Image (tube, rainbow, N blue to C red):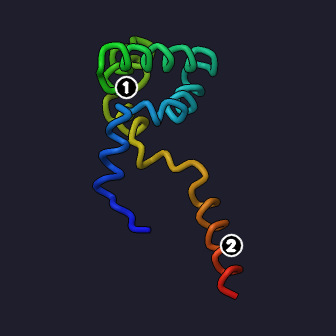
Amino acid sequence: MVVDPVRMGHNLDATGGLIVAEAVMMGLAPLLGRDAAHHVVQAACDRARTEGMPVAKALATIPEIVARLDATALETLTDPARYLGSTDAFIDRVLACARGIGE
């Protein structure tokens, strides 16, 4: 397998930011409360899909978010490179399996 970082970037961009919706919701939950965060992120995702805009742009139009996050914080929250979730655990498991196969 060959990893193509440029192609990966294009694939991430193709989602318009929808791929980070869960991370955004979890990032907003401490600021807005879990239910409110869910609702504003859902509204932003709906608008992004309907109007063909990036999720970050849709989020930037929501007063509850703009009142609590500046542009830099919102950009950080919607950056897929920062949303790695359980990546380290997955890598460790794959490497452990690969070591077992090679023995």
User: Could you tell whether 84 is left or right of 75 in the image?
Assistant: right
Above or below for 66 versus 91: above
Residue at (66%, 80%) from the top-left corner?
Answer: 99
Q: Position of residue 11 (x, y in %)?
A: 35, 44
**Distance Cα–Cα, label 2 vs label 1:** 37 Å
Residue 3 in picture, x, y percent from top left:
39, 64
Residue wearing tag 1: 55
Q: Residue 57: where, in percent of width, then height?
A: 31, 23
Callout 1: helix, strand or loop?
helix
Q: Is residue 87 left or right of residue 17?
A: right
At label 2, counting other C-alpha atoms closer than 10 Å, the crowd grade (few under 14, some 14-19, many 20 or more) is few
Name which residue type carries label 2. Answer: Cys
Q: Is residue 9 above or below residue 13?
A: below
Q: Is residue 74 left or right of residue 6?
A: right
**Label 2 residue SS:** helix
- For disc 2, the marked residue is 97
